């Protein structure tokens, strides 16, 4: 800022021409002009960093895409709210305990609850009987509401739970949630997690079954593009930056605790896309050691059928259909396709009620023969004249996760994803 006037400490007469001088503050003057210079505070950056880290360390009072929330409303037998009631929420799988006291409106909000395991809710207050509700299951991004009536003395009341079975929402978000048991019971070709969205009738397959670069099932909804889909993994963005064709981290199917396929009306967590959203939450360990193993084998070669019976050639619903007498067998084109897949998961405690681990690994080995077209230029065809080409497809997926409970409200999670995808093939099946 430049202002006209004499200096603060030196008179105008005492200043020689073109003389610079400085006052006590950050005011400089040249001749009759006083120039105020604003200097940088060297402590500004350290103070800013401290403020940022303090904000990160502060508890977040809302559920994220990989957690859930619970609202407990305490009332008496007349329906009036009961303040100052003690509410305890216990995760039966990890032993985590969250406690709070109902406010003047009789309600308690408990955010950032893990999806692993089930919950037991206990409510008590002096002069009333204790109430307990067990086996409450939560889903990602949703808020379950429990209305707990307290009766005088030792009488028992019925606890009403909203939003845990069919998924009651207060917003217009539309989607299909799939939990671990549903995923385990669904036969999925190739064990590709990106095939799960096709279980939602709002989605359809985009471009074949994937290509060499992504090994994923493309899916779209409405008139959208497959490049408009956004992916979220454990609450963090998982979009592949080059072309946004698929998720950057490929997660083994056995590592998924819940997957939600959202078609429209997203909440702010998914507000950066114009297409669908795929939210994945991975499994974490519990106080119990548990695991699973899967093996699939399709030998191919001499084990692969060369002919098929004509039985069933005519469907029963078409009585006019007659199997040709000259048709002795159905001989399809023989395309050797040998496939083997192995998958395993194990999880458990490192320190009971405090630190847990969960690891999953998938390995796929496939040799599939395809045939080159005779219309290709001669220099592209094998010199020996054979048109058959066997592609060797290999894939290794690994997901490892460690959860450590810092406090009853704060948990530190470390996850490692590894994808190995060496392949030599003209096309991926």
Image (cartoon, helix red, strand yellow):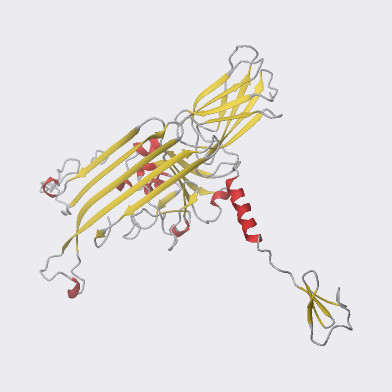
Q: Residue furthest bottom?
A: 17
Residue 299 visible in the picture? yes
Residue located at (86% from left, 74% from top): 9
Residue located at (55% from left, 49% from top): 269
Would you place residue 241 above or below residue 175 in this image?
Answer: below
Give the x, y percent position of residue 297.
21, 43
Residue located at (57% from left, 26% from top): 88
Would you place residue 60 above or below residue 393 in this image?
Answer: above
Give the x, y percent position of residue 202.
46, 48
Judge left or right: residue 181 versus residue 43.
Answer: left
Q: Residue furthest front?
A: 14
Give the x, y percent position of residue 415.
42, 47
Residue 189 visible in the picture? no
Judge left or right: residue 72 versus residue 278.
Answer: right
Give the x, y percent position of residue 185.
34, 36
Along the line of sight, the residue nearer the viewer: 285 or 355: 355
Quarter of the image containing the C terminus? bottom left
Would you place residue 156 above or below residue 82 in this image?
Answer: above
Q: Residue furthest top?
A: 154
Residue located at (25% from left, 45% from top): 341
């Amino acid at each position: 800022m430049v202002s006209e006037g004499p200096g603060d400490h030196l008179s105008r007469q005492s200043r020689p021409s073109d003389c610079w001088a400085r006052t006590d503050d950050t005011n400089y003057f040249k001749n009759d002009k006083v120039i105020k210079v604003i200097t940088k505070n060297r402590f500004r950056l350290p103070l800013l960093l401290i403020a940022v880290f303090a904000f990160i360390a502060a508890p977040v009072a809302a559920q994220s895409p990989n957690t859930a929330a619970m609202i407990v409303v305490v009332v008496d037998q007349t329906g009036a709210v009961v303040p100052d009631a003690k509410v305890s929420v216990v995760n039966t799988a990890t032993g985590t305990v969250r406690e709070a006291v109902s406010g003047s409106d009789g309600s308690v909000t408990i955010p950032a609850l893990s999806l692993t395991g089930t919950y037991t809710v206990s409510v008590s207050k002096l002069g009333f009987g204790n109430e307990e509700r067990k086996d409450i299951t939560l889903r990602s991004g949703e808020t379950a509401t429990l209305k707990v009536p307290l009766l005088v003395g030792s009488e028992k009341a019925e606890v009403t739970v909203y939003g845990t079975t069919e998924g009651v929402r207060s917003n217009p978000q539309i989607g299909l949630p799939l939990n671990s048991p549903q995923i385990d019971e669904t036969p999925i070709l190739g064990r590709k997690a990106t095939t799960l969205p096709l279980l939602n009738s709002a989605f359809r397959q985009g471009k074949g079954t994937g290509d060499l670069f992504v090994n994923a099932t493309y899916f779209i909804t409405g008139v959208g593009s497959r490049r408009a889909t956004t992916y979220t993994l454990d609450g963090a963005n998982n979009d592949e930056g080059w072309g946004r064709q698929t998720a950057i981290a490929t997660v083994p199917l056995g590592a998924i605790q819940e997957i939600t396929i959202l078609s429209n009306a997203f909440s702010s967590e998914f507000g950066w896309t114009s297409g669908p959203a795929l939210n994945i939450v991975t499994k974490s360990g519990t106080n119990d050691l548990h695991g699973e193993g899967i093996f699939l084998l399709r030998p191919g070669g001499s084990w692969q059928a060369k002919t098929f019976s004509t039985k069933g050639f005519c469907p029963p619903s078409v009585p006019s259909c007659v199997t040709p007498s000259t048709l002795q067998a159905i001989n399809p084109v023989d395309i050797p396709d040998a496939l083997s897949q192995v998958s395993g998961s194990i999880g458990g405690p490192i320190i009971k009620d405090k630190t847990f681990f969960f690891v999953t690994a998938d390995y796929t080995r496939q040799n599939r023969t395809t045939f080159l077209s005779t219309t290709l230029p001669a220099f592209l065809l094998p010199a020996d004249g054979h048109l058959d080409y066997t592609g060797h497809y290999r894939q290794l997926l690994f997901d490892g996760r460690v959860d450590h409970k810092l406090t009853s409200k704060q948990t530190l999670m470390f996850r490692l994803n590894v994808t190995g995808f060496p392949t030599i093939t003209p096309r991926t099946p």
